[in-house]
Image: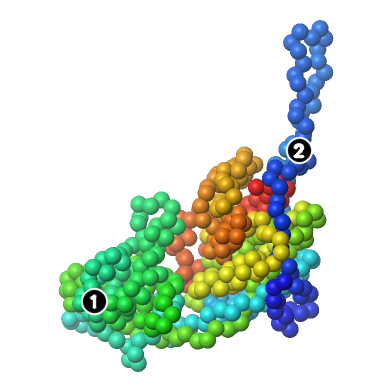
């Protein structure tokens, strides 16, 4: 049994809080469903009299069920309406913020009004970092006034001294290049990590992952060599003046240095200035601060399984977003799609064989405390989770699923369903990683997955002020929810 919070007074009337047991069992693969009998053998060509007409085979019930799921989502879907509420009322849902507190209450109220079997909050302590006053980053030229550079402090950044700091800049394109400079080439300077996402990489998420080390670990590595601050080219294929924030990590006990992301155009301006004058300087003022951890909660709702109530299937997304972002694609879309899966099952009267659980995690962006706390509760409880799928790649047109498993080739087994998904644009199940919040479950033997939408536009918006409702297409959003509901129905009925 895990430790659940009491709901806040604003939602007590709507939600009955019950302790959820995070348990389960093992789903049997290939369990029988209501499949049609094989077609009758064709009559012999030697028959003396014409054979009676053979009735057309009845439709595949699995195909019919997916058709019903997609129709429900596209005709009666509530995901876009819920997303409008979430991002308009609670933008900037960073851990420790009042906006995240409000989003937790909102999610509990929405799930509590759906007639689910259980809804509860799982207590999670989350970090509390604040950006403070707007950043000021200026290129100091030899002549004329300073040139402003569009920038956002990275999550976890330290503050500059009062009045800011100014220093020469040294450019690197990789962490090994930084290490090769040694302390003598870095100490007292600002390190500028200037490696862009590779434009030749077709899948933007792959390019993002390859370039992400300079943002995630670069500032700490620069600090270890005596740098006074770090600047990072924003992780995006876009070429605009919009900076992208994100988390950077400093080891416990190592004071963070000021660290900020430059917009692509600002990074180009700095690159050109340094090419013209290697001694060019940058002035920056950041007002960040780290405060003590604060209480928050994962929000959990479930439909109890009719045959195997202690065997759990999970769908989820993360409630938090960056403080400067409305968080519509990252990950408001995933939140409302996960809620929509339960709504679709309820609206169609689908009684799952196994318990279907929606988990809305907190603190994915700057700590992963929600996912870690949920996995710890699962490990300590009796039974077993069977399958967990996350949606955290935006609300664009769904294309397929990434599947990870320690139980053999789960992606290959899921590929048998591709003919069912083909009419809806789902074209692959590939072996790979899953969302950050469900990934800890993989180590416990749970098969995990992630919805993979078309991602060509996602990193234009990711971790920016532009990630608003106007960037989300309602039909694409609902198609993603339908794809998730369909996959969970198939896992529930046929096993994986």
Residue 294 place in picture, x, y as percent: 58, 83
Which quadrant is home to the N terminus? Answer: bottom right
* Residue 135 vertical position relative to residue 432 in the rendered view, above or below: below
* Residue 59 vertical position relative to residue 154 in the rendered view, above or below: above
The answer to whether residue 320 is seen in the rendering is no
* Residue 361 vertical position relative to residue 390 in the rendered view, above or below: below
Residue 83 place in picture, x, y as percent: 62, 67
- Residue located at (60% from left, 60% from top): 444
Q: Is residue 489 left or right of residue 330?
A: right
Q: Quadrant of residue 312?
A: bottom right
Q: Quadrant of residue 84?
A: bottom right
- Quick one: SS at disc 2? loop
The answer to whether residue 373 is seen in the rendering is yes
Q: Is residue 98 left or right of residue 222?
A: right
- Residue located at (41% from left, 77% from top): 251
Q: CA distance from mark 1 to mark 2?
A: 69 Å
- Quick one: SS at disc 1? helix
- Residue located at (75% from left, 73% from top): 19
Residue 8 place in picture, x, y as percent: 71, 82
Q: Quadrant of residue 51?
A: top right
Residue 68 place in picture, x, y as percent: 73, 48
- Residue located at (38% from left, 70% from top): 217
10 Å neighbourhood of mark 1: few (<14), some, or many (≥20)? some
Q: Nearer the viewer, mark 1 or mark 2?
A: 1
Of labels 1 and 2, earlier in sequence is 2
Give the number of the disc on residue 203: none
10 Å neighbourhood of mark 2: few (<14), some, or many (≥20)? few
In this rendering, the count of numbered labels is 2
Q: Is residue 41 left or right of residue 252?
A: right
The residue where tag 1 is placed is: 183
The residue where tag 2 is placed is: 35
């Amino acid at each position: 049994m895990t430790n659940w919070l009491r709901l806040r007074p604003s939602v007590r009337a709507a939600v009955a809080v019950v302790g959820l047991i995070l348990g389960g069992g093992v789903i049997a693969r290939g369990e029988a469903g209501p499949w049609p009998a094989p077609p009758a053998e064709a009559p012999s060509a030697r028959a003396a009299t014409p054979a009676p007409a053979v009735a057309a085979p009845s439709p595949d019930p699995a195909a019919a069920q997916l058709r019903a799921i997609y129709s429900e989502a596209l005709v009666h879907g509530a995901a876009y309406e819920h997303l409008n509420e979430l991002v308009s009322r609670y933008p900037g849902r960073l851990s420790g913020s009042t906006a995240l507190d409000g989003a937790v209450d909102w999610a509990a109220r929405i799930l509590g009004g759906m007639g689910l079997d259980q809804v509860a909050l799982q207590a999670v302590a989350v970090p509390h970092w604040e950006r403070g006053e707007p950043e000021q980053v200026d290129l100091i030229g030899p002549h004329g006034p300073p040139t402003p550079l569009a920038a956002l402090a990275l999550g976890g950044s330290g503050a500059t001294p009062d009045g800011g700091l100014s220093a020469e800049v040294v450019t690197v394109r990789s962490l090994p290049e930084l290490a090769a400079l040694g302390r003598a080439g870095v100490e007292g300077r600002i390190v500028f990590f200037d490696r862009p996402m590779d434009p030749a990489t077709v899948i933007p998420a792959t390019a993002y992952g390859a370039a992400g080390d300079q943002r995630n670990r670069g500032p700490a590595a620069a600090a270890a060599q005596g740098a006074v601050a770090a600047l990072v080219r924003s992780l995006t294929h876009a070429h605009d003046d919009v900076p992208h924030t994100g988390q950077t990590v400093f080891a416990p006990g190592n004071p963070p240095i000021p660290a900020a992301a430059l917009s692509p155009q600002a990074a180009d301006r700095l690159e050109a200035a340094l090419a013209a004058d290697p001694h060019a300087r940058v002035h920056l003022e950041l007002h960040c601060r780290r405060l003590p951890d604060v209480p928050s909660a994962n929000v959990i709702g479930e439909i109890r399984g009719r045959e195997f109530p202690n065997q759990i299937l999970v769908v989820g997304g993360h409630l938090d977003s960056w403080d400067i972002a409305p968080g519509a694609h990252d990950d408001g879309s995933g939140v409302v799609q996960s809620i929509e899966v339960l709504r679709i099952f309820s609206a169609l009267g689908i009684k799952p064989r196994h318990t279907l659980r929606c988990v809305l995690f907190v603190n994915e962006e700057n700590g992963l405390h929600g996912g870690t706390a949920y996995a710890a509760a699962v490990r300590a409880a009796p039974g077993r989770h069977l399958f967990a799928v996350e949606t955290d790649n935006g609300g664009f047109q769904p294309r397929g699923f990434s599947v990870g498993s320690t139980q053999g080739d789960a992606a290959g087994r899921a590929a048998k369903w591709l003919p069912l998904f083909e009419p809806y644009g789902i074209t692959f199940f590939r072996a790979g990683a899953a969302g950050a919040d469900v990934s800890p479950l993989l180590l416990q033997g749970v098969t995990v997955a992630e919805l993979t939408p078309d991602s060509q536009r996602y990193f234009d918006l990711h971790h920016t002020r532009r990630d608003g409702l106007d960037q989300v297409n309602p039909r694409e959003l609902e198609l993603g929810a339908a794809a998730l509901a369909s996959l969970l129905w198939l896992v529930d009925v046929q096993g994986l």
